[in-house]
Image: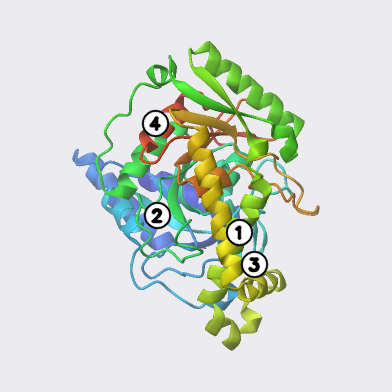
Amino acid sequence: MTRVSARCRAALDAARASNLNAWRWLDTDGALQAAAESDERLARGAARPLEGQLIAVKANIAVAGWPHDGGLRTRRSQRADRDAIVVRRLRDAGAVLLGLTHMDEAALGATGSSIEGPIQHPLREGWSVGGSSGGSAAALLAGHCDAALGTDTIGSIRIPAAFCGISGLKPTPDLVSLEGVLPLDSRFDHVGPMSRNAESLWPLLCCLRGLPAVPTADADELLAGRQLGVLEGLESLGCAEAVLETYAASIAELRDAGAVLRRIDVRQFNLSRLRRAVFSLCERSLALEHTARRAADPEGYSTAMHAMLDYGARLGPADCERFEQRVAAFRDTWTACVAGLDACLAPTSPVTSFPHASSPPTNIANLTVIATAAGWPAASVPCAVAAGALPIGLQILAPPGQDARVCALGTRLAAGSSAA
């Protein structure tokens, strides 16, 4: 058996044997066929950019003939009739698609709990991997795949990446096609790559855009003399002590590398209210999207999802306008604060992983919402932590269109980005 085929078969075996609840569905025959084709191409020197890479796909992204449920029980019998554009581009680049990963119901959550139960953390059984792209993060950390597709609305790629010690990117809005992706709120939705190695984010992003992976700028040159924003006042967000300490070490590394740092006080933004505004707008959009289906199949939704959709359905035009104004006001304030900066650095989340049996923290997405509301690309990369400690993510944000800069800085600052 040749190299890609052997890796593919081993990955499928590991995924089937796993008790992580990371995988929704595996395409054994299709993956092995694609792996054999990759081996044949490699043998004759005709490799494509992602030849033989093993890829997981989040369950809200369409893959022809595969289930297409978006984590919703009401859609469990549905199959996709064609590939999403991003899936087609992965195939064209030589990727081997293994299957679908579990996710939070309808992508409206950050705890890493699917309708088939909690997704287990590969490092700590019974602990959260974050969400909503939690299955993809768990599969990566467990070593089942080389990369994965996730979606990010308020932090659904970046939070699982941080909790699992891997890397993930939310691109600039509209940079990557959403065709074939079940919507949460199209104004805030993004498709992006997740990987065990930060240096893989840029070539994966180029593939998802249908472009060749041109080299990024040298990361050390991006740091020396550059104007970078760093956050202060993080205690007001309830940041865990380990997160604060790790973030301080990252700031020190930036300073030592020659970056010019500008302090930005997060207390001026009221990020918890901003996160609530964006989440409410998503609840409203999803309620409208599911009005008819929910009336026809109320049992197809969990109690928690019914509560969120009921809230979204109650929001009127005045409520939505108030939330829209809150987002717009933040964007204006943020733009003024960061004028002239090349990038900003922040913790990915104020908290680390937590037990599934505990009440989820309410502040999980209070830092990822910044890039969502501002329209900035942002990556989460793993920080160096003590042996046995929970992973902590570092978030790199840059102005719209500067995704290459985000990826280059992420590669420069990442630590410990290997599978368990």
| Mark 3 lies on residue | 115
Mark 2, other Cα within 10 Å: few <14 / some 14–19 / many ≥20: many
Mark closest to the chain's N terminus, 4 or 3: 3
Q: Is residue 213 visible?
A: yes
| Mark 1 lies on residue | 279
Q: Residue 376, located in which quarter of the rendered image?
A: top left
Give the Cα separation between the discs numbered 4 and 3. Answer: 37 Å
Mark closest to the chain's N terminus, 4 or 2: 2
Labels 1 and 2 touching (C-beta < 8 A): no
Number of the front mark, 4 or 3: 4
Number of the front mark, 4 or 2: 4
Mark 3: secondary structure: loop
Q: Residue at x 40, y 65 (%)?
A: 62
User: x%, y% of residue 274?
Assistant: 62, 51
| Mark 4 lies on residue | 405
Give the Cα separation between the discs numbered 1 and 4. Answer: 28 Å
Mark closest to the chain's N terminus, 1 or 4: 1
Amino acid type, residue under disc 2 in the picture: Leu
Amino acid type, residue under disc 1 in the picture: Phe
Amino acid type, residue under disc 3 in the picture: Ile
Number of the front mark, 1 or 3: 1
Mark 2: secondary structure: strand
Depicted 241 relative to depicted 295: above or below: above
User: x%, y% of residue 300?
Assistant: 62, 79
| Mark 2 lies on residue | 97
Q: Is residue 385 visible?
A: no
Mark 4, other Cα within 10 Å: few <14 / some 14–19 / many ≥20: many
Give the Cα separation between the discs numbered 1 and 3. Answer: 20 Å
